[in-house]
Image (cartoon, grey):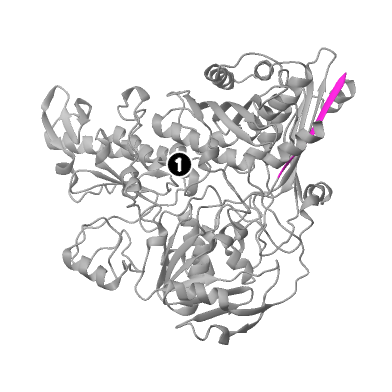
Amino acid sequence: MNAKLDDAPISLARRRLLQAGGALLVSFSANLPLPGVADAAGKAVRPPLVPEQLDSFIALRPDGGFTVYFGKVDMGLGVDTAVSQMVADELDVELDQIHVIMGDTGQTVDQGGASGSWAVEKGGGQLRYAAAEARRILIERAAQRLGVPADGLDTRDGDVFLTAQPAKRISYKALMGDGYFRTPLTWNGQLGNNLLARGKARPKSPSQYRIVGQSAQRASLRDNVFGQLKFVTDVRLHGMLHARVIRPPVVGAEPQTIDKASVKDIPGVRIVHERGLLAVLAEKEWNAIRAASLLDVTWTTSADRFPDQAKLYDHIRAAPVLKRNQEHSSGDLAGAMVMAAKTVTATYEWPFQSHACIVGACAVADVRADGATVWTGSQKPHAVRNGVARILDLPPEKVRAIWSRGPGSYGRNDAGDAALEAAHLSRVTGRPVRLQYTRQQGTGWDPKGPATVHTCKAALDADGNVIAYQVENRGFSRTNVMYNEEDPRDSLVGQLLGKGQNSTEGLGSTSETYRFPAALYAWETVPPLVKNASPLRTGHLRDPVGPQVNFAGESFIDELAAATGTDPVEFRLRYQHDPRAVAAIKAAADKFGWTPRVAASQVARSGPYRGRGFALAQRYGTIVAVAVEVEINRETGALRQLRWAAAHDCGQVINPHNLRLMVEGNIIQSGSRSLHEEVTFDREKVTSIDWMSYPILDSTEAPERIYVVLLDRPEIPPTGAGEGATRPVPAALANAIFDATGVRLRRAPFTAERIKAALSAKA
């Protein structure tokens, strides 16, 4: 039970065994030794895993390379490569000397997992401090060994050398003994994203970097290309049961009677029924799949109902307010509105959206009397550890969560639900359990991005100047289930088991950098449509609420430009005060080849419509400006994305090539959300449960060209790039549709049918 997934060559005997067995069986121990515990032979092991110890973040390997312990994970964005570059530069070693272990709660401290685009900014920043301290200690040890002052030494290629006599040097290996530093750090007492533990050393200045700023190849590229990456779906344990859950056909229903005889002909089927939870398990996965489809269940009736989808936005407008938050207010808004020569108003609407991961979530759990181990694709494995501990009534130190690649995440998807559900089923059955959700469950039952309504109003004076500006956002809370899984009440299984709910209220406003004489930005949340165990429970989806609030704000800015007869880029520059935003606007416009004109002033009278749109976004410290050109089929309403230009300022650039890929990925995914993605439902259930009913952008619809301008600012620490370019895409597309056709779409997604209907209405 102590084998693990690795890349070791398969021996001839092992090959014959696999051929005979027909499957790869990889076993794990649920009680793998944790750092800080000496082995039986008394061999030195890694010191205790605590944030105030340098060894919790970095160790020297016997081959002279370094292992970095990163309490975050890489959801396919290459952040492990970026932090490797940061560490390698601090230690003066080559990039291939750095190996990163991510998201294993038995080997890494809690740095918050993947969240907030903070992997490089905060997680990488912490590793930069750790690496700088490691280098300082190595230099001090070399100074003692060589009998020279430390300030006369330097480092390069894994050696410490005398600056005046470069040939006089000593290797890191010779200075490290068993590879551990056993050095305390000063810790700020926080876990998660804001964890910061420093030593005496200060990181290098940007002018000293050799590897940061270079387009290093991603660490996982080779394995990705050759199909050798290991995923959570590849984990197999000895004695493991395969599980499938059965969700209610109607929201709020629970199993009433279960006819076990309906699956009696399927070998080894086990049925678990507890309150609203129903699952089938079997030794063979196909048998579990068959049992889930054949089990005869009658369900209770339910009083829970959704509103008619056609009345969703009316429901949001009329629903009671649970919380109101005024994020920004300046000037005399009411007075300016009264004095206005002209007012402009508009309302925008955004639907529920699914994470739509390429497959449903999977998790493997091995729960024993003395502890539990869970393999999860969640982007927050430390939260999974805590959530599993709570649902099993175990101390967190008795649970180990091991991150394994899943089908993507970008927020709070169904991976955490699967982990907690697998752990519960493992405890009930006394066996390791591999739980796999179906396509229909993954899309139909994952936490959704919230539906919202946005009301905008502006006052203009007699000269067309904006003297007051107001944006009010209203919708379902983006934390109806929390952004992590550490409380079972935020998981579907916890709610099905009657553990209650943990809903909190949060939405958000645009982070605009425009300056108006008077302004108000506020948001309000409304109650969920169904309170408990709902397929429309809402949570974080990539750049939580960013695309919808920016869709409203930047569409409205465009409407104001049109109302004043001003070019959209010129209008944005007129009210912009942030020099970084000004630079981004100008860079995107220049790369696009933007020429000034009023939007919708050149609508084609025949043939396909063509138009361009512009949008600006700020997400925390990252600023993105984008311009897009589209072509629209006059008869069908189908939209083609011809070209994008994006200017991206996220402070210091660590890996330019990978950053460009990240910006491209943001634009493509956000384009899919803008043009296609909408959760559909009737009064009783979600009806968008597969790729036909919940389509996403396919390869034939991808933008023909995406140009990316990186505004590198080495003097500013990295501010995050995982989500920034997601934010301005919907508004840019909506603005391009208006420029092309003269029709303003204020409801997303901008499907071909919706564009065609708008064109028909105009005609």
Q: Amino acid at mark 1?
A: Ala
Q: In the image, which residues are magenta?
A: 341-350
**Picture quadrant where residue 701 is located:** top right
Q: Residue at x 34, y 22 (%)?
A: 207
Residue 728 x/y as whole percent: 61, 32
Residue 416 in the image: state x and y as whole percent. Answer: 52, 59
- Nearer to us in this view, 293 or 84: 293
Identify which residue, 342 or 749, lies in the foreground. 749
Residue 763 point in image, percent of width and height: 81, 30
Element type where label 1 sits in the image: helix
Return the residue at label 1: 119
Residue at 53% x, 43% y: name it.
698
- The reply to whether the magenta stretch includes residue 343 is yes
In the image, residue 159 lies in the stretch drawn in magenta: no
Q: Position of residue 74 (x, y in %)?
A: 42, 46
**344 or 351, nearer to the observer:** 351
Q: Is residue 392 visible?
A: yes
Q: Is residue 739 above or below residue 14?
A: above
> In the figure, residue 583 lies in which quadrant?
top right
Is 176 placed left or right of 320 in the picture? left
429 left or right, relative to 681: left
Query: What number of labels is visible?
Result: 1
| Residue 282: quadrant of the picture | bottom left
Vertical relation: 683 (above or below) 731: below
| Quadrant location, the N terminus | bottom left
Q: Is residue 557 visible?
A: no
Q: Main secondary structure of the magenta part?
A: strand
Residue situated furthest left in the rendering: 167
How crowded pointer 1 is (Cα within 10 Å; few <14, some 14-19, many 20+) is rated as many
- Considering every residue shown, the one lying at the far right of the view is 338
